[in-house]
Image (cartoon, coloured by chain):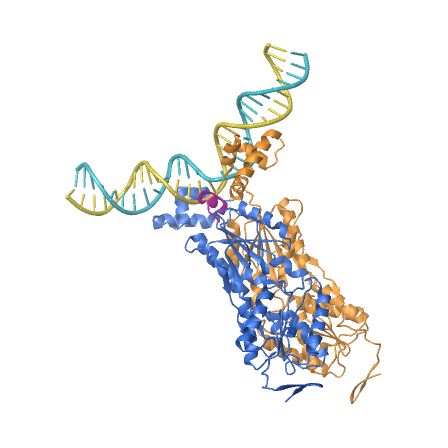
Chain colours: A orange, B blue, C yellow, D cyan
Amino acid sequence: MVTIYDVAKAANVSPKTVSRVINRDPAVKATTEKKVRTAIAKLGYVPSTAARAMRSNKSGLVGLITGAISLCPDRTEPSGLPDLFIVQGIQKAIEGTRKTLLIADTGGRHDRVPELIRTFEEHRVEGLIYVAEYHQRISLPKVAASTKMVLANCYDDNATPCVLPDDRQGQQRLVEGLIAKGHRRIAYLSFSASHDATILRTKGYYDALKAAGIEGDPALVIPSDIADDNATGEAQLLWDAIDRLLALPEPPTAICFGNDRMAMRAYGILRSRGLSLPSDISLAGYDNYRLIAETLYPPLTSVDLPYHAIGIRAMQILLGAIDGTAEMPTAPVLVSGQVHQRQSVTEQPATIIQFSPLGRTTQ
Amino acid sequence: MVTIYDVAKAANVSPKTVSRVINRDPAVKATTEKKVRTAIAKLGYVPSTAARAMRSNKSGLVGLITGAISLCPDRTEPSGLPDLFIVQGIQKAIEGTRKTLLIADTGGRHDRVPELIRTFEEHRVEGLIYVAEYHQRISLPKVAASTKMVLANCYDDNATPCVLPDDRQGQQRLVEGLIAKGHRRIAYLSFSASHDATILRTKGYYDALKAAGIEGDPALVIPSDIADDNATGEAQLLWDAIDRLLALPEPPTAICFGNDRMAMRAYGILRSRGLSLPSDISLAGYDNYRLIAETLYPPLTSVDLPYHAIGIRAMQILLGAIDGTAEMPTAPVLVSGQVHQRQSVTEQPATIIQFSPLGRTTQ
DNA sequence: CAGCGTCTTGACATCGGTGTCATGACATCG
DNA sequence: CGATGTCATGACACCGATGTCAAGACGCTG
């Protein structure tokens, strides 16, 4: 490999002068610079970051730990993919800076995280971002105090700076949209209640109802407590939940789902129950997983999970801390996502619903 | 940052001895080793790869260039995601080796590739993999001869070692499966004929027919020449193509699609035409994009695009070349994907189809 | 023309590991 | 007991860049 010494010899100058040229030191005479640049081009010299890093004690590396890459293929799982968008946002935010991103994938095994952090420390990364596959609390091993760390899509007990989706607000706005279209009986088929996202979104759901003066009905809120790897079980639960809703004396005119994939399944289930979409019932997802939301017929109303923005914010915070130009935030940074109105939700004509011993009558 | 000298001082040995301990040199007395390990643990010493790399001239880094990460979000595009699986395969293959993967994303802009290669050269990567988002011919700038390179999902004119999906065989096996179920009139709604994959798969389609003694009917093969970013245009073309097929005097009993997403759209279109799936017509996709193929109702027969395996093979080839334990292949390495039979394809009862001036009659 | 400041360049040490070779301690053998 | 060999360890140089400091060239001033 050609070194700075080879270039120096070829250009008949000292290595230090070559170094000056590379680093655009203005104290180099134009003629000398030309000589050096010619030699660099002729020899195809590329400076070694390793040597540079050793001298300056700055690696120019930023580490990223994620399961986004490995989690996609094996899981047909809903949340598996979108966290990749966080990675994309991070990539985008690092573009244009002089830093290089080192990506380590957990391969789905959390126990590998310490090992990955270790590798990063060996590479002397200047900062570290941990990306979780869904909104959750985590606990990470200690890293050197000099290594800045930011959490994306997760938080811990040590007040490590973190960037989170504003799940409460997202669901609230979605439901507000349904209410604005005249819906009053709005069901919510959520994920497992043990998820942070579910708790926050359920709160958002009730907040929206309350703001509109609609009383919440617990019969309309059904969480699915399923194991993530059990696709048939999930489908079964969804059938049951939908049947329960349809059998209510006063069934919902709209259903919100925990994510777009649940909604996608529901399209098939509801149609096999003889309902027309969206005229008989309106549906809304979550995630705005465009592959699903835009391809389904009718296209699905959904809420952005602002993963891309989360990635960008996380990296911005980290870069600011590395440069020393910005302080790390001490409270979680919330990023909100936009509601995308599509044709799966229709205007609900103002109706008066009456109860009778025989069931429901709509006038 | 604590260095090997700090450890040496703390353990009261020479730095060289610490180095020996780190590298598991057996020539160190047990008592000495213990002293050193204690000091390492107490000080939290982590060796610097930069320093190591400089001395040994081996970075332990492998570079990966891809658009897989950035291409996902903006494109609702079919092929946008799956190449990520190649990256995952690569990750998997590098696990357990002592190498670290450096991932560079093009951000969708091919003109950034030289810049990324440059960064890799600065980091002295020992090998380089380029991953394309779909099967295609590419052309890359020269890299240092000492840097091994492997292409995944693409090939070039310089006989650079490459790993490709066996598209011809995949489509052939898929169609063979349909034929085995009694289908004789099999349509193929492919991608744009300008894609390598389309050309190869179309060949596989005809090969399967020919092997079964069925004459190919050009009216059954319709390529969609659409711009990738035009979702509504794509949907329109699909409506038209399907209508054309259904209007044929002898319409197909099965339709193969260029990918699972096209098939997913077709579910809606065919049903809106009053057809029941799969009893009236059988459908098959390509890619085995499980999120779609398994979630659709009925689940979709499809062919694996063996992206994961492509990634693994590519990395294996590269690692072999870096170690010097294996020669680079001189011809493209083809990887074949399995056919996944699902309920979207039904047994076609042996029928005799007669033509009459009034149309088709099935007995 | 001596003295001084400015401009340009180079010598040298240094970052943190590791390869090479040397050294001292100790065991073995004739 | 001295010669030889083995074992464990250390001294030193080196990888490739760059920060520090100094030196030579040059022009300007008094």
Q: Main secondary structure of the magenta part?
A: helix
Q: Nearer the viewer, residue B61 or B251?
A: B251
Answer yes or no: is residue B276 visible. yes
Residue A66 magenta-drawn?
Answer: no
Residue B50 lies within the magenta run:
yes
Report which quarter residue A334 is drawn in. Answer: bottom right
Q: Looking at the image, is A52 positioned above or below residue A168?
A: above
Q: Is residue A273 above or below residue A329?
A: below
User: Of residues D13 and A323, which is closer to you in this image?
Assistant: D13
Expressed as whole percent of the image width and height from the top left, the position of residue A57 reads: 54, 42
Of A341 and C3, nearer the camera is A341
Where in the figure is residue A194, as x and y percent of width and height? 63, 70
Q: Which residues are magenta?
A: B49-59
Tell me if residue A85 can be seen: no
Quarter of image, res A291: bottom right
Q: Residue furthest front?
A: B357
In this rendering, would A249 be left or right of B290?
right
What is the x, y in percent for residue A117? 53, 54
